[in-house]
Image (cartoon, rainbow, N blue to C red):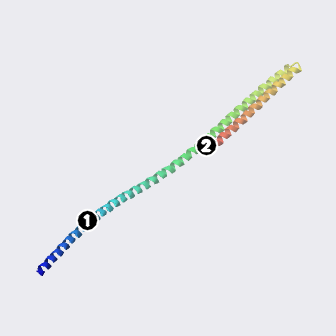
Amino acid sequence: NTHTEDVTEKKMELDSLKFSIVEEQKLLNQGLIQRKELDDEISMRQAVLADLKTSSDSLKKEVETLSSQHSLLVSDMEGLQEKAKNAYQLEEEKLKRERSEEEVLTLKKTIEDLEMERCGLVAGLEDQNEIDTLKFQLGEEKKKRMRVEEESERLRDQVNSLSKQAST
């Protein structure tokens, strides 16, 4: 009887061990499944990382290309600005010369006209009143001439000022 009890007890222990082994096997299988899932996740992240590295390298090359293009554009722009500045200065100088020459010719012509008019009037004057009137007119013409010269100087100053502004 004791023997039967021992056998029964041993069977129960054996069943308990079998149950524990089955449970341990289930846990082990779950662990293996989780490990496979983690390995898959790692592989997927490594693939994404490789894609990101490729994209990063591609973007670096694109940035380098764009940087080179930007440098070329800046250089071209600076060249064009210099050309525009030079063209502006040449045109400005040309206009100054033309205006100055035109003003000088106009003033000379006015002076000649006034001188001829004065000579003609002086020859035909009969009294001092007419001489005084002509002197007054000559003075007025001289004032006009001074105003023209002042205006010419003012215009030159404006041109110089605009030139300085254009160069900045």
Image coords of residue 99 (percent x, y): 68, 33
Residue 140, located in which quarter of the rendered image?
top right
- Residue at the image position 65 percent from the left and 41 percent from the top: 163
* Quadrant containing the N terminus in the rendered view: bottom left
> In this rendering, is residue 124 above or below 62?
above
Residue type of the residue flagged with mark 2: Asn
Q: Is residue 59 left or right of residue 132?
A: left
Of residues 71 and 23, the one nearer the viewer is 23
> In this rendering, is residue 158 above or below 128?
below
Residue 119, located in which quarter of the rendered image?
top right
Image coords of residue 121 (percent x, y): 83, 21
Determine which of the numbered discs, if any, sits on residue 30 in the image. 1
Q: Is residue 167 left or right of residue 56?
A: right
- Residue at the image position 41 percent from the left and 56 percent from the top: 56
Residue sticking out furthest to the bottom:
2
Residue sticking out furthest to the right:
128
Residue type of the residue flagged with mark 1: Gln
Residue 90, located in which quarter of the rendered image?
top right
- Residue at the image position 64 percent from the left and 38 percent from the top: 92
Image coords of residue 68 (percent x, y): 49, 52
Q: Earlier in the sequence, mark 2 or mark 1?
A: 1
**Local crowd at mark 1 within 10 Å, few (<14), some, or many (≥20)?**
few
Q: Which residue is mark 2?
A: 86
Image coords of residue 55 (percent x, y): 39, 55
Secondary structure, mark 1, is helix
Determine which of the numbered discs, if any, sits on residue 160 in the image. none
Rounded to the nearest angstrom, the CA distance separating label 2 from label 1 is 82 Å
Secondary structure, mark 2, is helix
Q: Is residue 118 left or right of residue 73?
A: right
